Image: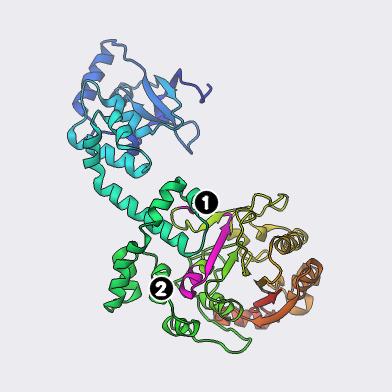
Amino acid sequence: MNPMKDVLVKIRTSDIFLDETIYPRENIDHKRIGIFVENLRDGFKFEPIEVQACPGKRGKYRILDGVHRWSAYKKTGQIEIDAIVKTLNSIDPLLYAAKLAIGPKQLTEAETRNTARRAFQTNPKLTSSEIGRAIGRSRQAVDSYIADLRATTLLELDLKIFHLNQLGIPQDRIAKRLGIPRRTLRDHLAEMPGLAFPPNSDLLKGFTVPQVAQKHGWPEPLVWSQALNKKDDQTRFKELNWGLRTWDLWNFIDCDNRFGDDWPGRIPAQLIAHILYFFSEQNDLIFDPMAGGGVCADTCLAMGRRCWSLDMDDRPEARPEIEPYHWDLEGKWDDLPIINSKDKPDLIICDPPYFDKKASEYAKQSISGLSRVNYLKFLERFFLFLKKISKKNIKLAFINADWRDFQNCPANKEDPKQAILIVDYYEIFKKTGWTLTHIIQAPLSSERFNPGVVAAMQKKKILGVTSRYVMILK
């Protein structure tokens, strides 16, 4: 069978299922199934049902039309059923099923309304006319069905545009990221000042940032960008309740859960804020090429910096500001989203997945899973590439740690050939034309080791690793 064509085949009834997400009716009519059962026993021949190959479930099919016929076949113990396998391509399966349902038993008004709303929620780009043609209703009727959903969708789109615009992402990339025409984007941008008025009004009334974020459905870092607007960096630190470290030892015990997602190798927002404080100015453009959970972008909002973020893990709804990009070791990287931009970053903050550490928690294509040789080879090419595409006075903040395979191995028996130390990164920087200006200690907390683990390590003379460094280069 070729699933790319609409073909008539026999399919096992057990390989077919009812997917309620694309079923336009509220309930199955069991009386109708009973009539069909009697028809089958009398030798009646039904028209084939219509099915679609189920996404993500090989060999399984979901019903587009014929739920009652299929149910009757199962009740009479028939193993196979005639079915037409449909390829819908860009056609919404729910609307296709709804159109077929307009037959002997019409959809009820409630079913029609519910179908219209479900279709719009699945694909907000559908027009009222497209939905109306499928469910047998006028455009005006569909408008009334989905008016509240459309208003919510427009508000969500406005908020995404506002978020990306606050971070200084160019309009062409915002439009591409959100899948909207440039003209539509310009229309929405014209409404941006009004969008921020209600949250700012509540902030002036004394509401806290978390309260405003919850009330208006804004990400908390975006509310901080409004609450701290026009304030200097020291005031921002104070209002965020972050102590400002004056020396080259930045010891933060915990991550700040207000900034960034729960993510493998997540770093404290305070660490990013200190880099921004000492090595950038407000409104500078920051580039985060391996954004992970988005700590850097969130912190930039609070600190009044613009930020472009990339990551191989694409989360368009949760993290629209992080554009998808995979730094493939074998790729040419000439398709980098920022490569042709007239604006160039003032500071690059690079917190790559650490070698081997948490490799099982990252995506399969993460550089963390590379061999030691390929990991260092990647970084050498990566830093050389960053140098070539950057302006002359750019700074690079590189966050990493010593890697030693100390697990269950006494310190004096470790194999140095399996280690990657901070000096190894330094050699790569020298080779690729970067000049080191600062080394800042930002150690991990030793409190992550429980007393039992510490006692076992002491007994075996295992020397653990809590070191972490911020290397500043130009």
Please, what secondary structure does the residue beneath circle 2 have? Answer: helix
Q: Position of residue 166 (x, y in %)?
A: 46, 64
Residue occupying image coordinates x 24% and y 40%: 143
* Nearer to me, 448 or 474: 474
Q: Position of residue 155 (x, y in %)?
A: 33, 55
Residue occupying image coordinates x 43% and y 61%: 163
Q: Count neighbours of disc 1 (C-alpha within 10 A) and say few if under 14, some if 14 to 19, many if 20 or more.
A: few
Range of the magenta residues? 298-316
What kind of residue is marked 2?
Trp
| Side of 443 where 15 appears, left or right | left
Task: State the mark number for residue 382.
Answer: none
Could you say which quadrant of the image residue 246 lies in? bottom right
Q: Is residue 26 visible in this depiction of the protein? A: no
Total marks drawn? 2
Q: What residue sits right under mark 1 in the picture?
A: 172
Q: What residue sits right under mark 2 in the picture?
A: 224
What kind of residue is marked 1?
Asp
Q: Is residue 81 magenta?
A: no
| Side of 97 where 353 appears, left or right | right
Residue depth check, mark 2 versus mark 1: number of the one nearer the observer: 1
Could you say which quadrant of the image residue 277 lies in? bottom right
Please, what secondary structure does the residue beneath circle 1 have? Answer: helix
Earlier in the chain: of badge 2 and badge 1, it is 1
In the image, residue 413 sits, relative to residue 234, either above or below, namely above
Q: Is residue 313 magenta?
A: yes
Give the Cα separation between the discs numbered 2 and 1.
Answer: 26 Å
* Nearer to me, 184 or 251: 184
Q: Position of residue 162 (x, y in %)?
A: 41, 60
Residue occupying image coordinates x 47% and y 58%: 319
In the image, residue 71 sits, relative to residue 42, either above or below, namely below
